[in-house]
Amino acid sequence: FGEQAEAFAPSNIALCKYWGKRDKVLNLPVNSSLSVSLAHLGSHTQIRPSSSGKDEVFLNGKSLPLEQAFAKKVVSFVDLFRRDQVLPLVVDTRNNIPTAAGLASSASGFAALTLALNRFFSLDLEDTVLSVFARMGSGSASRSIYSGFVEWQMGQQADGMDSHGIPIPVFWPDLCIGLVKVSTGQKAVDSRSGMQRTIDTAHLYGSWPAQAAGDLEKLHAALQSQDFEALGATAEHNAMSMHATMIASWPPLVYWKPESLMAMQKVWQLREAGIPVYFTMDAGPNLKLLFQQKHQALLEAEFSGLEVVTPFAVD
Ligand code: DP6
């Protein structure tokens, strides 16, 4: 094998969320989801042979103890590629996601790791197969194999080979994502356990698959007609519907902080005032705003510390 291999993968924001697994081992979702990748914000991963005789996992320059949960997950993921060869490796991941953005990095992390392993072992796998592998690390990572808009098709097969990302060839240059960091505070329940608790305890979850399927159709239509308001409204409704299932779980899963609700109310007031701005939220307290470039200055003035990403900017 080569001396070393490296790869970059972007973070992504889901406009139609993945919430719930139909297979926990293969990481197969209950519903298809749709996201937009965040261009240059994501993870950069390097793989190289380890000279210490054992695996080493670095995150942002810090060595992680191998018994730590994330390091364990990385090593067992590497084993999918290494199989039974004796080949200790160094996995060195750096996220360039601003810490202030409050974005999860497992999507870009497992996608970058998959791409780097594909290079290190000279496998030359197709994108869809790379997406299948990334999915096994973290569901949302299946979408981070691609840039731009991506649909993660849930698939039907028991082996999961048809459950992977597909790029949607739509270019939307004036689309902006604004990252609103509302709070740090204590660590929230992670997505994996959160979605399990929702499935196990929330009757309301029964309505989620149909909501997600309908929203996916609406998003595709909005992408085809470049209808920003339909895109934003569908994404916000989808996120609120997902949060409704979380809140209806027991014990309740409330990812919101008072500041989250204040930011939502500000978005709704701005819309009342005629500014087309929408939001989406994941398993955490931070909002991600969706708006058009012409409103960037106004929104930067309204939300202090807003981090703006333009997924389709040509630089
Ligand atoms: C709310 O992909 O982090 O962000 O597959 O268990 O690793 P695992 O979960 P993960 O879940 C993401 C959930 C979400 C919605 C989304 O990104 O689609």
Image (tube, rainbow, N blue to C red):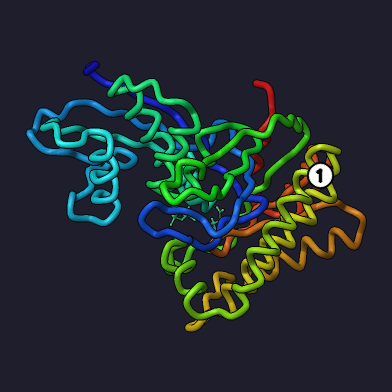
Compared to 94, does 21 lie above or below?
below
Q: Nearer the viewer, residue 163 or 9?
A: 163
In the picture, measured across the screen, residue 265 lies left or right of residue 52, that is right
Q: Residue 224's x, y, as percent?
A: 81, 37
Compared to 222, does 173 lie above or below?
above
Q: Secondary structure at mark 1?
A: helix
Question: Quadrant of residue 189 in the image?
Answer: bottom left
Categorize mark 1 by other alpha carbons within 10 Å: few (<14), some (14-19), many (20+): some
Q: Nearer the viewer, residue 88 or 200?
A: 200
Badge 1 is on which residue? 222
Q: Residue 98's x, y, as percent?
A: 50, 43
Residue furthest to the front in view is: 157
Q: Residue 103's x, y, as percent?
A: 52, 50
Q: Which quarter of the rendered picture does the C terminus lie within?
A: top right
Q: Residue at x 53, y 50 (%)?
A: 156
Q: Residue 92's x, y, as percent?
A: 29, 34
In the picture, measured across the screen, residue 251 lies left or right of residue 136, that is right
Q: Is residue 187 visible?
A: no
Q: What's the residue type where badge 1 is placed?
A: Ala
Residue furthest to the top in view is: 2
Q: Residue at x 68, y 66 (%)?
A: 240
Question: Quadrant of residue 75 in the image?
Answer: top left
Q: Is residue 130 visible?
A: yes
Compared to 180, does 243 lie above or below?
below
Q: Which quarter of the rendered picture does the N terminus lie within?
A: top left
Q: Residue at x 10, y 32 (%)?
A: 86
Q: Nearer the viewer, residue 135 or 154?
A: 154
Q: Residue at x 35, y 26 (%)?
A: 118
